[in-house]
Amino acid sequence: MSNDKTVKKSRLKLFLPLAFFLTFCILLYVGLFLEDKKELPSALLNDPVPEFSLPKLKQPNEIVTQETLKGQVYLLNVWGSWCPACKVEHPYLVKLAKRGVRIIGLSYKDEDADALRWLQRLEDPYTFNIVDKDGRLGVDLGVYGAPETFLVDKKGIIRYKHVGIVDQRVWVEVLKPKYGQLQKEVL
Amino acid sequence: MNPELGLFALILATCLALLQSVVPLVGSYTGRLRWMNAGRSLATGQFIFTLLSFSCLVYAFLADDFTVKYVASNSNSLLPAIYKVTATWGGHEGSLLLWILTLTGWGQVVAMRSGKLPPELSARVLSVLGMVSVGFLLFILLTSNPFERLLPFPPQDGADLNPLLQDLGMIVHPPMLYMGYVGFAVAFAFAIAALMGGQLDSAWARWARPWTTVAWAFLTAGIALGSWWAYYELGWGGWWFWDPVENASLMPWLAGTALMHSLAVTEKRGLFKSWTLLLAIATFSLSLFGTFLVRSGVLTSVHAFASDPMRGLFVLGYLMLVVGASLTLFAFKAPEIRSKITFNLLSRETLLLVNNVLLITSCATVLLGTMFPLLVDALDLGMVSVGPPYFNMLFVPMALMLAFALGIGIMLNWKKGTVSWLVQQLRWVFVVSALGGLAFGFMYGDSFVISEALGIGMVFWIVLVILKDIYNKTRNANGLFAGLKKLKPSYYGMQLAHFGLAVTFVGAAMSGGYSEQKDLRMNPGDIAELGEYAFRFDGVEQEHGPNYMANAGTLTVFKNQEKVATLHPEKRVYAVQGMPMTEAGIDAGLTRDLYVALGEPLGDDAWAVRLHIKPFVRFLWLGAIFMALGGLLAVSDKRYRVRLKKKAANKAAVAKGKARKGKTAVAGGRA
């Protein structure tokens, strides 16, 4: 009798891998349809940039707050020298900056020295960089990973978020039309 | 016409795959030999039609047929011919076709060599392989047709191949990787067939082992190539980024390594049977999961070029079907193949179990790190990203523990050992390794780095244990040479692969701990010192490539006033995509790489230049080569061949032999 029970128990154990796998699949399924994770969750869309007070990368004495940034349309680009995809994205940002697009960088979970070396080695497309060393602002912004780019309007309201690399296609098809429209808005 | 031919061939291959997944299987349950044997010709047919289809796609690339959408978006008339061929697998559709070609290729080899297996087993193995390929063929036909036309208005020229992929490493990397990924499908098919038959003996393990080992060797080579490519092509001097797609290939490798060791126990001792089966399923599932990661865009990564949720959904459904069904089968059938042998706590079995636990834990660690952002996001706990520190913190200690267990495992005998004997055997090896590691840590470089000292200590440990073991095994023979001759290729293969691991450890520890780097602004004629080298910047010149413009720099490197190398780092801009690319200038040496990358022009002929000295970085890939060769050497062992030949002879007599003996001998040689 007791023997029977142990056999049953060990049989049940054999279903563990299956159970684990099915849970895993649910996760993947949810991940696949996570409310278009390339865009900002609708709850956060059209919210103002969260409050923060952080130093600039090149001028560590200057403190930037969400108020400092108001007045102009800009792209807030989250990057880190540790992120290979940012490296791929970088040249296109340089191109955009040369065309006069205002890009503000968020140096995300990075060592300042590494970030500075990166900017010195490659070109610096950023009007300036905000240092978010512990990723606190990143959490408030709902940053999923780097690179990510937020489009912020003149009133400091986030109007769009792009996860992943901004390249020619993303810019021309998605960001540029919105950017142009926001430029025309009056304060 | 050509693309339509390709598509038609692909559809025919799908039909054959469907038949292959049903007919031999039904035959194996009803005892119809002819149905079972049909699997082989179906596998061959499937392979030939897939090959034809693939050739059509290659031809479309070579002929610049921009009416084909896939060609138009991945090639350009200016692209050098060799890259036109490799552009075939430069995008999603084509790499999927390559995946299928590899799978049917493996199926073909299995069919050729299956004459020696019991007919039921070979029929079921081929059926399972057929099912696997049906899924992928449907995937490509329904969601990712590479032969789709852009008619009636084809573009004048193509959008060009991603410049990152216009490179030698990238030509060989995907086929190698796929050989590995898909090779595990064979091990998986063997496992499923064993579960269906409810039978698993050491003969089964002897059949399944070479396939697993060969697949593993290819995967090892493929991962090493990928890492090498990232090293020189991304221009960072790094060799592993813990990128989700890199992890996708590392996980099956870790599981596959565990499987290889567990199979050894199953063959030699008839133990760990259901565990081996589970590992075979897990390894292939992780290969499929890797495909899912890359193709679905569930995680963002450098490699995820095109992603599409519909495709992701298809792969996920497929994954659920294949893995879910296998695990269900496993849950019901595994009790039939329980092993009833016991072993001593201190024995090679235990150490191999430790090996498996460590490998599977590292695999789980990587899986968790890769999926964690998604998990947290899905549970709505906010958003998090996991960086390299997480992986390094957990992975490195486990690798060190694995190396330590490896030494003991090699030394111990099967069944049982005694502590006193083990201590007697290994105490000096241990002392020398510990002293060696410490001495190294203090003497090399400027400061003592604990992880590097441990790493080098483990290198001593592995190498010395291998030597000690060879000594133990040869000392009773008449002379060293006679003793060495007696040892089997599988033994040498094992030791070579383990030695390879030690070599890779050297590369990881040395390049990780003692690399030197400098970023500076250099004018022509400037000299910069780094380590014991002096780098002279000789300026930058414009050069024209076939489809790019390049700023090619020249640096001359001196050591003790003597010229040791001339380096040519380049900055390329590819015409069609306007994408800048860094080509590092590398002077490769066994003990150090001199690595130079060109940054941006800073005006007045001055450039930003990055100099690296990477000690022993080549050892990383050299070790991987040893590991892969070790795997191939182990497979060449006679014991996989002799018995098979005997079986082949019996089998040929029974099945009215279709002159398969000749083929067996040939294929056997390849084992």
Image (cartoon, helix red, strand yellow):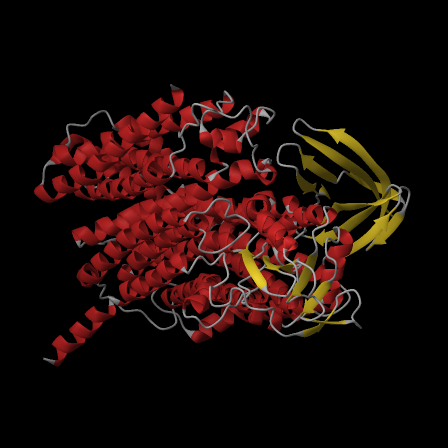
Q: Nearer the viewer, residue A133 or A49?
A: A49
Quadrant of residue B430 within the rendered picture: bottom right
Q: Is residue B488 visible?
A: no
**Residue A153, percent from left and from top:** 62, 60
Q: Nearer the viewer, residue A20 or B642?
A: A20
Is residue B217 shown left or right of residue B660?
right
* Residue B626 to residue A17: above or below: above
Image point 48% across, 22% down: which residue?
A: B65
**Residue A97, percent from left and from top:** 72, 50
Q: Is residue B125 visible?
A: yes
Image point 67% across, 64% down: which residue?
A: A107
| Residue sitting farthest toward the bottom | A2
Quadrant assignment for the N terminus of chain A: bottom left
* Residue B306 to residue A27: above or below: above
**Number of labelled discs?**
0
* Residue B153 to residue B387: above or below: above
Image point 60% across, 36% down: which residue?
A: B167
Quadrant of residue B539 within the rendered picture: top right
